[in-house]
Structures are given as structure tokens and as C-alpha cells.
Amino acid sequence: MVANATQRNAGRPSALLIEDDLVHGALARMILDAAGIQVFVASTQQEALEILGDARPSLVLVAWDIDGIDGRTMLLYLRAHIPALARIPAVLMTDRAVNARTRIELSIEGYQWILQKPIVMTSLPRLVQRTVTEARATSRDGQPMRQHSVRLVDCATAASSVYMEAVR
């Protein structure tokens, strides 16, 4: 008997990647897919809504700067229209400097990680797997996802113990 796509993907982590840079999006998709993570890519708010009409990803990867709207605003909009999305962890990808106040805001908005570009793409699958595993463990207790300080990974700290622990 041939398994359908839903059966094949059961238990497999999935990610919605909201990114309008075609090269960055294709590279992230290729690396995550090779690691066994199903990836849905949207470059606009409408594409994201269409994907979320059929799929519930395990994680959302959001680029901060997207043509016409910033990624943070887009994710807030999507979560307002799809309440179940509020329980799904998010990772923000940016080339902006992120100050302490913004980190607090991002934590409140449900981001688990801030990845400052350039991103070490080969470590991205481990980061996604870890974040999804943490979220699944948290959701088993029936409580809303616990808030914690959003973790920052910037190119200057790529070799730091925090980052290395995150991507093990």
C-alpha cells in the first residue's frame, strides 16, 4: 500500500518560511528539506494565508524585511487571523541590529530566536529541530507556550557556547 503525503509527513517537522529573497529562501528550503524538515515558502502575506489554509507548520521562520510589509507585522496579522498559529514558535531572521527593548518585544510576540544575517545555514536544521522539540514538549502539558527571553544568534557570536548548545 502506498502511503499518502499526509501519512509520509506525520511526525515530520515542518516550517513555514516567510522570505521574499528568492536565493535565501531557496537555500534555506534546500537545506531544511535535506534534513527531513518539510518547508512551505511564502514571499507575501497572501501566499502565507493560502499555505496556512491547508497546513499547520511546526515552526515559522520570518524574514524581518519583506517587500511591502515587515515580517513582524505579517506574523502578527497571520496570528490574528489564525489563532492556532499563536502556539507555534517563530524565528526571526534579520540583518538589523536588535536592541534590548526590541528583544523583549519579540519575546512577547512569541519569537524563540533572532538569527542575524548572515545565517549559518548548515546549522539551521538543528536549530529548527531543537525549537520544534521544545515547543512539542511544552504543548504536551496543555499550557500555552511559555515565554522566555528570545535568544539572539548574530554573526559575531556564531561560535559562542550559546549558539553551539542551540545547534547540537
Image (cartoon, grey):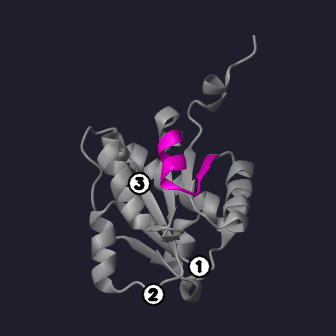
Residue 17 quadrant: bottom right
Q: Secondary structure at mark 3?
A: loop
| Position in image of residue 103 (x %, y %) | 33, 77
Q: Residues within 10 Å of mark 3 (few under 14, many from 20)?
A: many
Q: Residues within 10 Å of mark 1 (few under 14, many from 20)?
A: some
Q: Please determine whether, in this image, residue 29 is positioned above or below residue 87.
A: below
Q: Which residue is disc 3 drawn over?
A: 89
| Position in image of residue 13 (x %, y %) | 56, 43
Name the one closer to the observer, 84 or 32: 84
Q: Is residue 48 visible?
A: yes
Q: Disc 1 vs disc 3: Cβ atoms closer than 8 Å?
A: no
Q: Which residue is disc 2 drawn over?
A: 97
User: Split into 4 quadrants, where in the image is the C terminus?
Assistant: bottom right
Q: Residue at x 40, y 57 (%)?
A: 75
Q: Is residue 148 visible?
A: no
Q: Is residue 22 magenta?
A: no
Check disc 1 and give the amino acid type. Lys
User: Split into 4 quadrants, where in the image is the N terminus?
Assistant: top right
Q: Which residue is disc 1 drawn over?
A: 117
Image position of 105 (left or right of 98) = left
The residue range painted magenta reads: 39-50
Name the one closer to the observer, 30 or 54: 54
| Position in image of residue 76 (x %, y %) | 34, 57
* Number of numbered discs on residues: 3
Q: Residues within 10 Å of mark 2 (few under 14, many from 20)?
A: few
Q: Residue at x 48, y 71 (%)?
A: 64
Check disc 2 and give the amino acid type. Ala
Q: Nearer the viewer, mark 2 or mark 3?
A: 2
Does label 2 or label 1 sit earlier along the sequence? 2
